[in-house]
Structure formats: structure tokens, C-alpha cells
């Protein structure tokens, strides 16, 4: 299959609804709701992933129910004072019955690097590279998705330049961090990002420059 025929943004999650869906906004007369989906990892850690869902799919979605969600990982900017904050959520296109023996967290993106990658190592010498991908969607819009790569993938991506086209597969993860505020206080916040498992550098729509598999959980 040629890359132009592939979806540039696809996500499948399966987990337990962590809270009752709450109304967030209207768009073109359609109401939208949000809830957190608790998605298990192999390590038994839970990723708490925000799900945005239309009123057309909200029926039967109650706290504690186990469901599957098919959709896209999307972003938008929310004004906060004089600044704006990048908000990430999985936009649900379909709600599915749970399946047995299925990977509960899979995602694929095709996008373009829009900021220079940031490479670093942890105190335990684990290599990490952060990269922001612009993923095109319909109506000339784009989603800006923060991605994180490890090990071999981190070393590869750190050499990439702005504008490079990537195809990545992996999972969506959540993590908590401490945000220092302007008044000197701090706040515990949750970040959401795409954890890269495999990456392909795309030179042309039909040409793949290189492929690397990540061997980290």
C-alpha cells in the first residue's frame, strides 16, 4: 500500500472508563463530552488517556465500563491568560465492545518534524529524544503531537531536521510532572505524548530511507 493511501493518524485503545463523561463544548450544533480511559500497560501501570466523544456516541458510556475506542490523537490550543496551552485528546470515531487478547494501546502517525529534536540522557544513561510532529488532517488542519523516542530510535531521530517526514507506530502514554508557575509555586500536571516503538524516515511518498525497531517497553 502506498503511504498516501494510509491514514496519517489512527489510534486504538481499550480500557476502563475512569469517570463519568462530562460536557465540554459545542461545534456546529453538535455537543462533545470528555472522559478519561484507564489503559493498562504490560508493567501494570495505567495510562489515563483523555477521550473526546460526540453526543452521537455517548449512549451507554458510564464510569467503570470497559470499552474499545477507535479514533485519532488530536491537539488544540487552549488560551491561558496571555499564553496558550497545547491540549491533547483522543477523538473517538467509534466505540467498540472489548476484545480479548488484544493490544490495548496502539497508534500510528505520519507527520513532519516541526521543531528541532531535543536529545538527552537520564542519570541512568538512558537515551531519550523529544520530537514534535505536525500531522495533517482534513480541511487544511494539523495536529501537533509531542513524541518521545528511546535508545536506538532516539539516536536516529536526533539527527533529523525540521521538515523531515516520519511514519511512527507506538502507544499513547500519560505521565505526571511538576510545573513551576510564575508566582513561584508549583503544580502537578499530566502530560500526554506518543511513545515511539518503530520509526520510518520517508524521503518520498513511496520511498523509505530507514527503519528502526525500539526494544523498550
Image: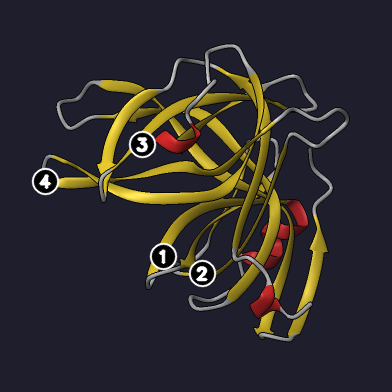
Which is in the foreground here, disc 1 or disc 2? 1
Q: Is residue 164 left or right of residue 101?
A: left
Q: Is residue 192 left or right of residue 195?
A: left
Q: Residues within 10 Å of mark 2 (few under 14, many from 20)?
A: many
Q: Which mark is residue 32?
A: 3
Residue marked by disc 4: 82
Which is in the foreground here, disc 4 or disc 3? 3
Mark 4–mark 1 Cα distance, whole angstroms, equals 23 Å
Which is in the foreground here, disc 1 or disc 3? 3
Work out whether mark 4 precedes mark 1 in sequence or the reverse, and give the earlier one: 4
The one nearer the camera, 120 or 144, is 144
Mark 1–mark 3 Cα distance, whole angstroms, equals 20 Å
Chosen colour scheme? secondary structure
Disc 4 + disc 3, Cβ < 8 Å: no
Residue plotted at (46% across, 51% down): 74
Q: At numbered mark 3, what does the secondary structure look like: helix, strand or loop?
A: strand
Amino acid at each position: 500500500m502506498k503511504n498516501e493511501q494510509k491514514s496519517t493518524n489512527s489510534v486504538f485503545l481499550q480500557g476502563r472508563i475512569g469517570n463519568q463523561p462530562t460536557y465540554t463544548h459545542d461545534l456546529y450544533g453538535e455537543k462533545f463530552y470528555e472522559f478519561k480511559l484507564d489503559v493498562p500497560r504490560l508493567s501494570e501501570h495505567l495510562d489515563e488517556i483523555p477521550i473526546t466523544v460526540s453526543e452521537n456516541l455517548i449512549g451507554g458510556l458510564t464510569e467503570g465500563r470497559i470499552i474499545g475506542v477507535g479514533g485519532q490523537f488530536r491537539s488544540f490550543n487552549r488560551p491561558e491568560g496571555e499564553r496558550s496551552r497545547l491540549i491533547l485528546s483522543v477523538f473517538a470515531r467509534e466505540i467498540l465492545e472489548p476484545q480479548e487478547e488484544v493490544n490495548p494501546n496502539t497508534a500510528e502517525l505520519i507527520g513532519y518534524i516541526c521543531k528541532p529534536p531535543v536529545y538527552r540522557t537520564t542519570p541512568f544513561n538512558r537515551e531519550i529524544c523529544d520530537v514534535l510532529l505536525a500531522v495533517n488532517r482534513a480541511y487544511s488542519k494539523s495536529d501537533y503531537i509531542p513524541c518521545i523516542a528511546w535508545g536506538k530510535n532516539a539516536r536516529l531521530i536526533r539527527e533529523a531536521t525540521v521538515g523531515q517526514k516520519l511514519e511512527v507506530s507506538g502507544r499513547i502514554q500519560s505521565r505526571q510532572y511538576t510545573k513551576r508557575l510564575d508566582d513561584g509555586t508549583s503544580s502537578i500536571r499530566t502530560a500526554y505524548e506518543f511513545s515511539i516503538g518503530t520509526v520510518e524516515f520517508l524521503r518520498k511518498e513511496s520511498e523509505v530511507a530507514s527503519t528502526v525497531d525500539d526494544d523498550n517497553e
